[in-house]
Image: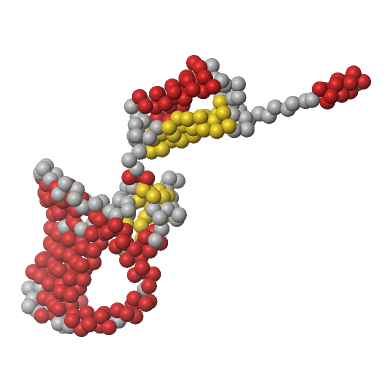
Amino acid sequence: MFFDSFVMAFSIAGLDSETLKNLGISIGILLLFILFRNLFTKYVFQLILKLSRKTPTEIFTQIFLGFERPLGWAFIIVGLYIAMDYFPFMEQQNALFLKFLRSMIIVLITWGFFNLSSPASGIIISLNQKLNNKIDLILIPFISRIIRVIMIAISISIIGQEFNYDVNGLVAGLGLGGLAFALAAKEAVGNLIGGVVIVTEKPFSIGDWILTPSVEGTVEDINFRSTKVRTFSQALVTVPNSTLANEPITNWSRMGKRRITFHLGLNYQTTKEQIQRVVSRIEQMLVTHEEIHPDTIMVAFDHYNESSLDILIYFFTNSTVWAEHVKIKHDVNLKIMGILEEEGVEVAFPSRTIYVSPQTNELLETMGSLD
């Protein structure tokens, strides 16, 4: 009933039965390839993916994942080409149609390689591991973005040539407008140059803990314009590369050792002999401690404070990891406390001694007796 109405409608439009037949075949072929695409994505591709994951390397898996969606669209392009053989209103060998199909194939290929060049795809990291990590982690996202820009530029130029567009004229136009562009995008160019400086000098890498006048935290990403830093409060701070490149950068992750220094205040009742024994025992404890760096250890009676005799304790831990560093400091403090207890020495606390003259003392006693 519906088909008869459909045929009647097109008959009124002046289409004969042969034309309608070819139109129906053309639409049917296109719908069939759309069905094939869904079946391929749901069953065949998943099977190929499982087989690729059994290989010793993940490169093939990353390639299949990168081209998953472009392959799905490739079914539609093939179906469109075959369906056009029966399409009554346009020839299959139509020049504009063929240019369109070739351009779509270029787009799909670029799309697949664009996905592969993503840092999230892991293929660049996998290749870097095979090269024994010769590429610094900070270079990976930067290289990825450069590759993407180059691929898009090449793709656009090929598609432009496909439609007989003069790409050389476009490049010349960009060259003439380069100065105006640079002046208009001064900040963007500055950030780009700052990114190049950071990548070439490598003051930090992805995952490093850095401190600058602008931010402190862990480096998560670097791109052409900015660097993203995750602070310890889990906030994500985006710092322009031009700012970061002109600031002093402290990279805590590249410390070979981590410092601990403080003053230990002993009360004024401590004798000279007790101070000497305490200093000697604390220094010996630090020298023999497995987690203390042996190069720089200083324990000495430093100066007379208002209410304490201060001993300077200065040393470094082997570990630079904050949690391990705190545990070592905790252990050292407990050992120092044990030494003080064994030597009968007390830690000083803020205090003040008031001396009263005999005359003042008699006056106070007299005033007390009057009460």
Q: Nearer the viewer, residue 34 or 151?
A: 151
Q: Nearer the viewer, residue 174 or 258?
A: 258
Residue 144 x/y as whole percent = 23, 59
- Give the residue displayed 45% in from the left and 54% down from the top: 213
In the image, residue 184 sits, relative to residue 51, either above or below, namely: below
Residue 281 x/y as whole percent = 43, 22
For the C terminus, the image quarter is: top right
For the N terminus, the image quarter is: bottom left
- Please state the total of marks drawn on the protein image: 0
User: Quarter-wise, where is residue 280 in the image?
Assistant: top left
User: From where the camera sits, is residue 285 visible?
Assistant: yes
- Give the residue displayed 39% in from the left and 27% down from the top: 286
Residue 147 x/y as whole percent = 21, 63
With 51 as the anchor, is 239 left or right in this view?
Answer: right
User: From where the camera sits, is residue 38 visible?
Assistant: no
In the image, residue 203 sits, relative to residue 96, either above or below, namely: above
With 184 as the anchor, is 8 left or right in this view?
Answer: left
Looking at the image, the residue that sits furthest to the right is 370
In the image, residue 186 sits, relative to residue 261, either above or below, namely: below
- Give the residue displayed 13% in from the left and 77% down from the top: 162
- Give the residue displayed 41% in from the left and 38% down from the top: 259
Residue 170 x/y as whole percent = 22, 81
The colour mode here is secondary structure
User: Quarter-wise, where is residue 70 in the image?
Assistant: bottom left
Q: Nearer the viewer, residue 165 or 69?
A: 165
With 253 as the anchor, is 77 left or right in this view?
Answer: left
